[in-house]
Image (cartoon, rainbow, N blue to C red):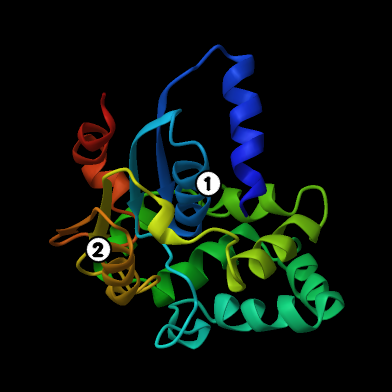
Amino acid sequence: MADWAGDVAAVTAAFGLSRFSMLGWSAGGPFALACAALLPERVVRIATVGGMAPLQPPLAAEQLGLRLDQLLFPLSARHRGLASLVVRGSKVVPARAVRSSLLRVLPAEDRVVVEAMAPAEAAAGTRDAVRHGPGGVVDDYAILGRDWGFPLADVALDVTVFQGSADTLLPRAHAEALAHQLPTGNLEVVEGAGHFLLHSHLGRVIDALVI
């Protein structure tokens, strides 16, 4: 995961961005934190939204809200071939079925967001992730499930850790762990919001990132 900082440094340099803020949603949170730890002279503000903490006791994959996550974290670490088959299978699941499966597991606060989406929109993330095969998805699960390659103590920036009070996909324990382990982590619980709080509280998050 630490290698991600080098990629971001190269891309932002190509666009002439010497300083920038970063937002990491869900499992994107760790990648944003890696950049904050390893590019301290470039990253000026950072926030995570429903962000994932390291899967170290007492946190475990079994506590996550999606059964697919519960399955793929250990499977990607131990049986890459089987994990690839599972991920490849998601490519052929009809968009309507993807949307329906989300609606079954989400709290009411998130169902409102997904219900407003057409099936194709609800399934777009899954489709894009496997467009070029399952390898990237399996790699992400494997990387996220092991040591991240940098200590959270190295993140010297103030980090706003946003967490929806009704989020069941990444439980509040993850936000609390991040806020505790980051030297200057600030936990902001958004009442009445779920994992998709960016859809209803985007302005609040952007305010925390504006330089």
Q: Secondary structure at mark 2?
A: helix
Residue located at (19% from left, 39% from top) = 204
Q: Is residue 133 above or below residue 73?
A: above
Q: Check disc 1 and give the amino acid type.
A: Glu
Residue located at (76% from left, 63% from top) = 92
Q: Check disc 2 and give the amino acid type.
A: Glu
Residue, disc 1: 121
Image quarter in which the N terminus is found: bottom right
Quarter residue 16 falls in: top right
Tell me the distance, in whole angstroms, between the alpha carbons under discs 1 and 2. Answer: 18 Å
Locate residue 105, reporting x and y percent.
Answer: 41, 76
Residue, disc 2: 109
Image position of 182 (left or right of 9): left
Image position of 164 (left or right of 48): left
Residue located at (24% from left, 62% from top) = 164
Q: Nearer the viewer, mark 1 or mark 2?
A: 2
